[in-house]
Amino acid sequence: MIGVVSFGMGNIGSVCNALEHLGHTPLIASAPEDLDKADRIILPGVGAFPAAMTRLSTSGFLDALNDQVREKGKPVLGICLGMQLLAETGTEFGDCAGLGWISGRVEIIPRGSSDLRLPQIGWNELVLKDNAQLFANIEGDTSCYFVHSYQLLPTDPSDIVATVDYGGPVTAAVQRDHIFGAQFHPEKSARVGLAVLDNFAKV
């Protein structure tokens, strides 16, 4: 059972449809106690970092997620903004504390050239690190779909398991132990995205 956190800032329908297509059972977690029934968790998110952290806190999901992931050790996958929330600090609209599960900060993508547009919207090819669990047995074109202006910059570079080139290397996926993050939208990334979700479901 894969709990998909529904806190009002994520496209959970597409994620659940992708999981069902793969033969996995999603559980829409609309209340913190729903996560007790899940053996792994997906945290999707779109929007602004501070608003998302406020929603998690006021809804009770912040404490529940810390209990399920930090205390009970359930695998978690943050998607898009959900990945950024894994960090210690976000910098959108000023510094804001994140979940703190991955040491590091979320900062705006540097505009290395005047024609670099933010947000990055569209397909970009992943550069994969060796032995990354999310990308096991994925061969050929690794393009995935992105919509973002910020990236997670871990304190420990070894937490980065995939990057893309967007005016320079940009963090595309992270992993620390049982905590995973995908900056791209796997539910919108065709073959590669489905493989990533399937790999997470089998962690």
Image (spheres, grey):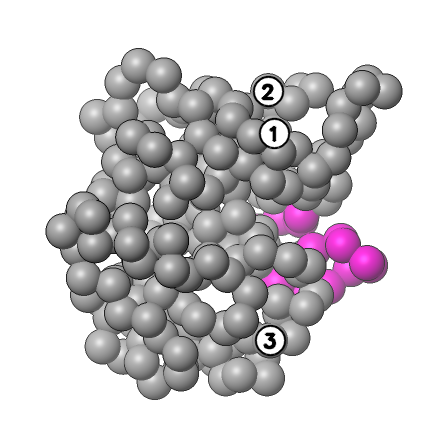
* Residue at disc 2, secondary structure: strand
The x, y position of residue 160, in whole percent, is 49, 35
Residue at the image point whose x is 50% and y is 84% from the top: 60
Q: For the residues marked 1 and 3, what is the alpha-carbon distance in whole angstroms? A: 27 Å
Q: What kind of element bears circle 3? A: helix
**Residue type indicated by callout 3:** Arg
Magenta run includes residue 128: no
Is residue 106 positioned above or below 156 on the image? below
Most distant residue in the left direction: 23
Q: Position of residue 170 (x, y in %)?
A: 61, 29
Name the spot of residue 71 as percent of width and height, x first: 35, 72
The location of residue 174, given as percent across then percent down, is: 46, 41
Q: Which badge, 3 or 2, is on the more N-terminal residue?
A: 3
Q: Which of the two labelled residues, at mark 2 and mark 1, occupies the earlier sequence position?
A: 2
Contact (Cβ within 8 Å) of mark 1 with mark 3? no
Q: Mark 2 = which residue?
A: 165
Q: Which residue is mark 1?
A: 170
> Is the residue marked by circle 1 packed among few (<14), some (14-19), or many (20+) residues within 10 Å?
many
Check residue 55 in the rendering and tell me which mark sits there, or answer none.
Answer: 3
Whether pointer 2 and pointer 1 mark residues with C-beta atoms closer than 8 Å, the reply is yes
Q: Answer left or right for 91 relative to 101.
A: right
Q: Is residue 110 above or below residue 181?
A: above
Magenta segment, which residues?
A: 90-106
Real-space Cα separation, disc 3 to disc 2, in angstroms: 32 Å
